[in-house]
Amino acid sequence: MELLELLNRIFIQDGAWLTILKGIWATVQISALSLFFGTALGALVCFCRLKGRKIVRFLAVSYIAILRGSPVLMLLMLFYYGVFSGIDLSPITVAVFAFSIHTSAHVAELLRASFMALDRGQIEAARTLGFSKVQAFRLVTLPQLSRIAKPVYQSTIVNLIQWTSVVGYVTITDLTRVINNIASRTMQPMITIIVGMLIYLSMSYAVYGLFALWDWTHRKKGAGCHADD
Amino acid sequence: MNMGKAKKLMGMLLCCALVGTMLAGCGSEKDQPAPATEKKANLRVGVLANLNASEKKLNEILQKIEEEAGDKAVTPNTYIYYDNLNSMQMGLSSKSIDAMSTYQSVADYLMARHSEFTLSNYPVHLKDAFCCAVRKDDTALQQAINTALDSMKADGTLDRLTKEYITELKKGEEPPKVEINRIEGADTLKVAVTGDLPPIDLILSDGSPAGFNTAVLAEMSKRMGKNIEIISVESAARSSTLTSKRADVIFWAIAPTGNDPRPADIDIPTGAVLTHPYFQDDIVHVDLKK
């Protein structure tokens, strides 16, 4: 009973839950936008890395090496307090930029690894059977690529959500910052951190859940197709 | 039971007995009293990290202060530096430190919420002065803030705010919400707060900044005729926020001038100048009740 009262006082009373929701929204917003732009940019970098001319390949390799080796907090602070300090960009825009390029380096590498794991013979067979390049990519390469890349991509998304916990350094009040503020105000750091961790855990499992749902829908569709046959 | 199983069971029992003996042995050794001739063990004291002074330099200063205080029976303390109050409090609760060094006002706020903490009998050697920091080239702003603070000091406003937000704060209560009224057509000052030093600086449950610093800001806004936009930032990024012009003013604590054993410029952010101090607080040690 005492614990419930304590939880109510820390997380519910005086609109604290609304502040937590706002923090979650900031985290989701930055993560979703960075994932979208990071994936698109990552695919482009991967293409340059695999198919580009020598100089383009070199640039892509350097891009991946620098960004994958840089701590995301350093990148974020470098962009916010250095590179973009003279430009009137909102902290969220700068954060999305920093996380997008960081994620793109990881996505580029995971796509490259997935490409290398593909059976080249199947693509050649498709081309021999008269498939155009686009058709071979869409109907043969892409389904296999997404199946191979999916487990690592899930982890990348979960990592991205966790990386965003440093945005408090660039004046953004995200979930971690809200949790820290609550811990300071109530002087109850342990219980506050545990609840914060559970919220992050729920977000991670929501990602895994979405992928599981995707898999389940596809299996169902596949089974439906076979039944029709 | 066949012979193989019996051997396995015997082996497991022996392993358990061995581990148990080792653990019991460790415990009994630890419980033995220290020899009378040995110096008292030094304390591991948690300290909030200063941003611009190195830990080595701070260790030297703090140990010199202890030596001068004259308790020769105590070996110098070991200082462990923390980024924020939350982690230092958890360090104390988990006994990874023996005491935490913090401000009297913060210690009172903490002890009002946790009966397991108490003030140690460690004598007060130091105090900090609280002031604002502005960019070096922003001398007009520094002057304007100084004028506002001086007038607040002269007419007793600072004392009133200190009472209302710190010394006369009811046990277990949070400082009241602060309203900063908007002045139409006036310039806006961006001020960075951290929210991790209650009751001086905290963020209320609705997400609004509050505490003594915010109350001082509201009064400064009236006297300077400027709007205040408060931005919340991690303590370690305050200096970068100021020098990169993301904020015009930040809050800072310094060694007060006078008899303080620390050099006055020990922790002044590079590229910044400080205003007159508006509050001073003793540095005390908090430890767990025995």
Image (cartoon, coloured by chain):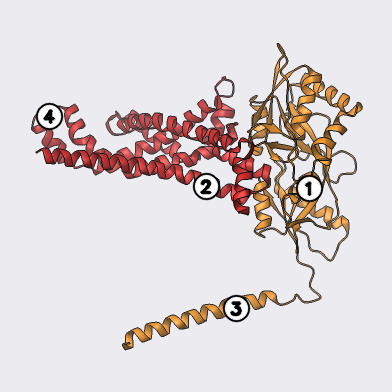
Question: Label 1 belongs to which residue?
Answer: B108
Left/right of residue B276 with respect to residue B54 in the rendered view:
right
Q: Position of residue A40 (x, y in %)?
A: 36, 29
Question: Label 3 belongs to which residue?
Answer: B24
Say which element carries label 2. Answer: helix
Q: Residue type at mark 4?
A: Phe
Q: Nearer the viewer, mark 1 or mark 4?
A: 1
Say which element carries label 3. Answer: helix
Q: What is the drawing colour of chain A?
A: red
Q: Are marks 3 and 4 on the same chain?
A: no
Q: Residue type at mark 1?
A: Asp
Quadrant containing the C terminus of chain B in the rendered view: bottom right
Residue occupying image coordinates x 37% and y 35%: A61
Q: Badge 1 local density, few (<14 within 10 Å), some, or many (20+)?
A: many
Question: Label 2 belongs to which residue?
Answer: A197
Q: Nearer the viewer, mark 3 or mark 4?
A: 3
User: Is residue A181 positioned above or below B149 on the image?
Assistant: below
Residue occupying image coordinates x 17% and y 39%: A224
Location of residue B78 by image quarter: bottom right
